[in-house]
Amino acid sequence: MRYWKSGIAASILAFATACATTPPPPPPTEQVRLETGEELFEKGMQALAQENWEAARDAFALATERDPSLANAHYNLGHVQEKLGDLAAAEAAYEGAVQADAGHKGAILNLGRVYRLRGKLDRAAALYEKALEADEYDVDYLNNLSVIYRLQKRYQEAEAALRKLLSRTPKNPEAYKNLGLIYFDQGNLRLAEFVLVEARKLDAEDAGIYNNLGMIALRNGDRRRALGYFRQAIEIDPDCYACHMNAGSIALAFRDYQAAHDAFQRAGELEPNRYEPFLMNAYALEGLKDAEGAVQAFERVLRLRDEDPEAIFGIAELYYGPLGKLEQAKAFYERYLAIPNAPRHEDAKTRLELVEARIAAGAAAAAQEQEERRRERRSSGDGDGLGLGDDFMGEYFEDQASDEEGLELEDEGMGDEPAEEGAGDGDLGGEDAQEGAAEE
């Protein structure tokens, strides 16, 4: 009996021990569901409607990763990247949209415009030429292709593209505007004016037409009449980028630097991704003796246009002249000389030699001053301390060219204004995107 009781006790003890040491079963795991590309796209559209550009960018970027076939996600990502001022990222996004949907018109138009803004004219031409294979009479593609051909100085091809367009749509004012600019670029001012007057008959409220007539008047030497046209254009459309640019150019030619600065600053607000207003504003700020502001404007140019020679040379001149920062000037002159076929190569080479000579002279003067101080201290028993020489201020060499040399006018042609469909209003397609009159 005693052994039986002992066995029961041992069994109970063993059971209790087992119950105490056995871990409880793990709770059921809950799998985290990743958002789909479509869901992320919708999230991006909501952020876009609220103009929360960073949130929209992140949502669209993740949507393209989850589903690379979402052409509109790529397209809207490009739109947002433009808003954020990153043209390289916008270009990549629009390229992704075209890869996902070769017929995405909004992406094609915006990609062509970004190519043009970044100086990639060959790519823009190839893009529009390929798009025209699907519809050889597409008004938007033909108008924009004519702009690219004109910028490439392929005038016969540019005119042929417009005449093809006018054969189907003879009352297209944009085509007449671009045709007038082709004649203007070739110096045929009388024919250019005739064509623009015809364009004005088709659309009397188009600010670009008055802007381009002002360009003709200016080329004919009639500044007063030109300024009248530009002001009339701004009155019709206060947001006319090209009109502000040209009004600023006239002010700059008259050395009215404050008026020029105001005009270029407004143009930069209207087109923050274009380098020209910041380049011209830098010259206006130089005229206002704001060297630091001019450097900042030139630096903005370089953020938009890699290795722009005018901006690099301008910064070098400011560091060499009014700012007196010789080491920085040396670096920028060297950077300029590294640009192939830089137009002011000899000027930069001469400046660099002068800068290096002044740096060397400054170093020699500083060394001599330090040696004299050592001698003084030795003779007075003060030890062998080191003295600091004065900062060496470089001489400023002003550019002797007149204010009108290199003055470039902004035309108001067809251009490739950002296609808005699928961007700010929740439209997912962007297929009916129309290019506005803004090749400014």
Image: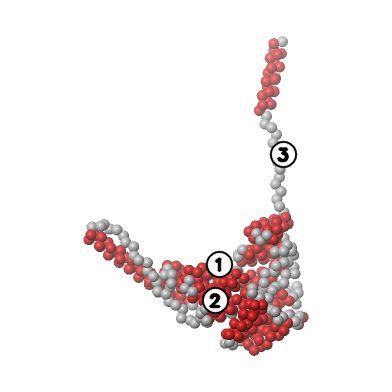
Circle 3: residue type: Pro
Q: Does label 2 or label 3 sit earlier along the sequence?
A: 3
Q: CA distance from mark 1 to mark 3?
A: 53 Å
Single out the mark in the foreground, 1 or 3.
1
Q: CA distance from mark 2 to mark 3?
A: 72 Å
Q: Position of residue 243 (x, y in %)?
A: 62, 77
Residue holding disc 2 = 259
The extreme top residue here reads 1
* Nearer to the camera, 278 or 348: 278
Q: How many marks?
A: 3
Mark 3 surroundings: few (<14), some (14-19) or many (≥20) residues within 10 A: few
In percent of the image, x 53 and y 81: which residue is there? 253
Q: Does label 1 or label 2 sit earlier along the sequence?
A: 2
Q: Position of residue 9 (x, y in %)?
A: 69, 17
Question: Is 146 above or below relative to 390?
Answer: below
Quadrant in which the N terminus is drawn: top right
Circle 1: residue type: Arg
Q: Quadrant of residue 325?
A: bottom left
Residue holding disc 3 = 28
The extreme front residue here reads 235
Q: Does label 1 or label 3 sit earlier along the sequence?
A: 3
Q: Position of residue 340 (x, y in %)?
A: 52, 74
Mark 2 surroundings: few (<14), some (14-19) or many (≥20) residues within 10 A: some
Circle 2: residue type: Ala
Q: Which mark is residue 231?
A: none
* Nearer to the camera, 212 or 9: 212
Q: Which mark is residue 303?
A: 1
Single out the mark in the foreground, 2 or 3.
2
Verify CB contact (< 8 Å) between mark 1 and mark 3: no
Mark 1 surroundings: few (<14), some (14-19) or many (≥20) residues within 10 A: some
